[in-house]
Image (cartoon, rainbow, N blue to C red):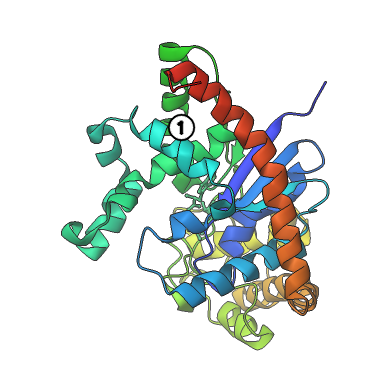
Amino acid sequence: MSKPRVLSGIQPTSDSFHIGNHLGALKNWVAMQDTHDCVYFIADMHAITVEQDPKLLRDRTLNSYAQLLALGIDSKKSILLVQSQVPQHAQLMWIMSCLTGIGEANRMTQFKDKAAKGGTSSASVGLLTYPILQAADILLYQANAVPVGEDQRQHLELTRDLAIRFNGRFGDVFTVPQAFIVKETAKIMDLQDPTSKMSKSAPSGCVNLLDPLKTTEKKFKSAVTDSETKIRFDQTKKPGVSNLLTINSAYSGQSVEQLVKAFEGRMYGDLKKETAEVVLSFIEPYQNRVAELLTDKSELETLMHNGADRAIEIAQETINAVYAKIGFAL
Ligand code: AMP
Ligand code: TRP
């Protein structure tokens, strides 16, 4: 029997992934290669739903591709592609947008948040239809599971609804996918404000994988904790300490319980310092791998094109099945 298919994407909207991206999403991408048939992509088409700088977008796409390889995505085992190089994403998106209600699209909380930030009147139609493109990304490859962070749950629900709607109306074409959200590390919090999610939009509390090592060390040193002294896990009462424990656990491989025991009677400063150490011991070799990959851009471009070619084979099959069902000329 063939392995279940996994699909996920990430936007090339920063120079570096951060540990929230890594622990909330990318770590699973790597792990799932052993048990699943994986398709991963750089969502550059999603990245233009807000204004982009063309050169920066192209650089970040290449950079993100190198970072995914350095994190352990194996371009032989898995398909690693750039969204805009596979035109079938846009083709299927049009069809799915004709199955989506305006009210349904309007209810997406990420759209509401993003539109509110930039002023609703200046939000693009692309920002509104963003989740429909995401649904097309997933359905195109008949994915069974989609590993993402908690914030993407609603988009996954929409994807499932659209798949069910299409299958019901025209006959079975799409696999209805499941969201795959990993519990303990699903949400990494900001080091400066541990009640909000770590995000590139708040740089002071965000740990980027490509930041200079000294910067990362400093960020952990100045992490916000609480006025108690006891190291224990309680996300409501002790969000800062709990976040450090979660991060430490993810990079050290020790469970939170083991860590709490090991830190019994010790100070917050020790937890911060040792958490920085385990994070840095991951980051240092990672940065070397990224630097090495970026020394040969044409090799990276070749890998991208190979990924797109392999993706197109699968994607075109889905488009053919969809076109046959919906009544497009044969
Ligand atoms: P973004 O950088 O917001 O486009 O997110 C890329 C991926 O990383 C998505 O799957 C997010 O759900 C995940 N992600 C982003 N920030 C965090 C965070 N602080 N904790 C856990 N997952 C995150
Ligand atoms: N919207 C996702 C994010 O911001 C990125 C994404 C685009 C995606 N298409 C996808 C994730 C398909 C999973 C599956 O993180």
Above or below — where is 106 with respect to 205?
A: above
Residue at 16 percent of width and 58 percent of height: 121
- Kindly give the residue lying farthest to the bottom in the view shown: 214
Residue 135 in view: no
Residue at 56 percent of width and 59 percent of height: 242
- Image spot of residue 146 (x, y percent): 59, 38
Above or below — where is 151 with respect to 176?
A: below
Q: State which quarter of the image contains the N terminus.
A: top right
Q: Secondary structure at mark 1?
A: helix
- Image spot of residue 199 (x, y percent): 47, 65
- Ligand 2 closer than 8 Å to label 1 CB: yes
Q: Residues within 10 Å of mark 1 (few under 14, many from 20)?
A: many
Residue 267 in view: yes
Describe residue 101's horizontal placement relative to residue 61 as left or right.
Answer: left
Quadrant housing residue 247: bottom right
- Judging by the rendered image, the residue that carries numbered circle 1 is 159
Quadrant housing residue 217: bottom right
Residue closer to the observer: 142 or 207: 142
Residue closer to the observer: 310 or 195: 310
- Kindly give the residue lying farthest to the left in the view shown: 121
Quadrant housing residue 237: bottom left
